[in-house]
Amino acid sequence: MALGYVGLSLCGVPQWWHMLSTGDVAGVSLPFLAAYAGSLACLQADWTPYSVGANDNASGVGVVLHLAHLLKEQHLLETEVWVLLSGCEEVGCYGMRDFLDRYGSMLRDAYFLNFEGVGVGTLRYATREGMTFPYFSDATLLDVAEAVAARHPAWQVRPRVLAAGYTETGLVVQRGFRGITLVCLDEGGFLPYWHQVGDMLDKLQPEALERAALFAWEMLQELDRRAP
């Protein structure tokens, strides 16, 4: 990677010299400048200390493990639940890709309930994800989420479009499966501490984690009641 950065930088010396000496911005390759800026952004990421990832996405892992414990103590009557901690979401959802490649044929009738940054902020359920291509959440799961939210108005859970990216649910929908994402957002509609070194354990809000777990638990119960 370092050699790639060095090579790109050396290739750009003539173009930078031309622009700085003549002021002729039009004579500079815009695709090159875009690639150069992207490389600088990658360097910034490489030189930044690793984040603990408390909210994104240790919070999701914690809620899933808590739900697994509840399911062990209190089985659903009509529904089999698989617990998955897929990993590698940030680099292209490779954990989920591998899981669907291996077990997708067994899960054509399954519902996928995804947890993304549920440790800080106000709980939302995604109706759609994706910046370039839209991935729509499953209609049944949306109906179940809406029903649970209506039963608990004090929780203030609302639907939300996630237009600034996609989660594992985007891949799930792309592959023809049924899914939905639960996520906590701040007042501006952003994931708190997303990709920031401040994403530390002391930032997590116990009430947010509890709400996500309770909401998901009721969704599971509702899906079980609706099972044929």
Image (spheres, helix red, strand yellow):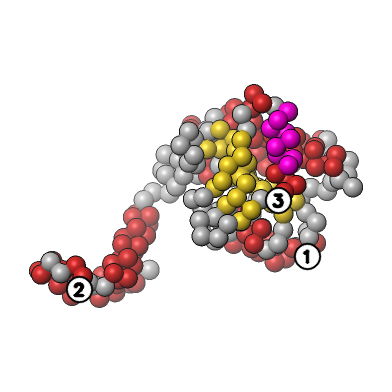
Q: Quadrant of residue 174?
A: bottom right
Magenta part of the chain:
143-151
CA gap, disc 3 to disc 2? 49 Å
Q: Which mark is first along the chain, 2 or 1?
A: 2
Q: Which dot, 1 or 2, sits closer to the camera? A: 2
- 37 sits left or right of 222 in the view: left
In the image, residue 144 lies in the stretch drawn in magenta: yes
Q: Of the residues under marks 3 and 2, which one precedes in the sequence?
A: 2
Which class describes the residues within 10 Å of circle 3: few (<14), some (14-19), or many (20+)? many
Taking the image as drawn, is residue 55 in sight?
Answer: yes
Q: Residues within 10 Å of mark 1 (few under 14, many from 20)?
A: few
| Tag 1 secondary structure | helix
Q: Give the number of the disc on residue 138.
A: 3
Q: Which quadrant of the structure image shows residue 100?
A: bottom right
Eyeballing the image, is 81 above or below 10? above
Label 1 sits on residue: 105
At 58% from the left and 42% from the top, the residue drawn is: 160
User: Three-letter amino acid code at disc 3?
Assistant: Asp
Question: Label 3's element?
Answer: loop
Task: Report x, y in % for residue 121.
Answer: 53, 33
